[in-house]
Amino acid sequence: MELIYQVMTQPGEVDYRAYAKAHIKSRSGKKGWVSLLAGVALIATALVPWARMGFSPLYLIPLAMGIGCFVADPISLHVLQKRLLESLPDEPIKQEFRFDAEGFQLRFRGEKKLHKYSDLERGVETGKHYFLYLNRNLAYILPKADFATGNAAAFAAFLQEKGVPVVQVKL
C-alpha cells in the first residue's frame, strides 16, 4: 500500500502535558459549562439562605459541592499529568507511525502493531498535536512537527475520511 502519512516521534514531557490538557478539555466539552453553572447554583443555594437566616451546617453540603464543580477539572488535570510524568521512561521511546489507505502501523522497540482506522474511537487535534484514541483513556501522541511524510494540517480531514471523528481543542 502507498504510504500517505509518516510520523517519526519521541514523545516527551511537553507532549504528555499537552495530552493531559487536551484529554481533560475534550472529555469536558459542554459538560464544562454545565459544571460551571451547577457550581454557581449550588454555591448560591448555600449562601443566599445563610445570608438571610444565619449559618446552618446543612449549608456546607451545597457549598462544598459547588466548590467541587469548580475544582474538579483542574484537580483531574493535575492528577493525570502527575501520573503520566511518573510513567515516562528515562529515555524517550522512538516511535514510527505509518498511515496508508487501509490502516496504520506503529513501530517501536522492535515491535510492530497494526491497526485499522475502525480501531480508533476518536481523534483530538490541538495547535501542535494530534491524539488518536484507541479507547476512552488511551491515545497515541502525534506531534504535528514530527510529520515526515504528508501534510500535518490535512491529517484531520484524512482521518474523518476514514470514519474517525476528530474534535479540535484549544489549549
Image (cartoon, rainbow, N blue to C red):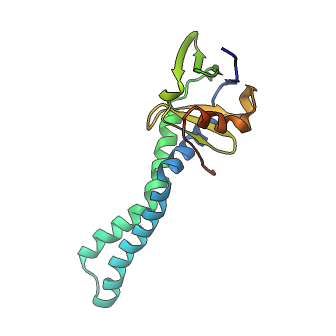
Q: Residue at x 47, y 54 (%)?
A: 73
The N terminus sits in image quarter: top right
The image shows residue 125, relative to residue 31, as above or below, that is above
Seen from the viewer's position, the closer of residues 64 and 144 is 144
The image shows residue 7, relative to residue 137, as above or below, that is above
Q: Residue furthest bottom?
A: 52
Image quadrant in which you'd find residue 11: top right
Q: Position of residue 21 (x, y in %)?
A: 56, 46
Q: Position of residue 117 (x, y in %)?
A: 54, 27
Q: Residue at x 52, y 44 (%)?
A: 23
Q: Position of residue 42 (x, y in %)?
A: 36, 72
The image shows residue 114, relative to residue 81, as above or below, that is above
Q: Relative to 31, is 100 on the left or the right?
A: right
Q: Position of residue 88 (x, y in %)?
A: 54, 28
Q: Residue at x 45, y 37 (%)?
A: 137
Q: Relative to 23, is 161 on the left or the right?
A: right
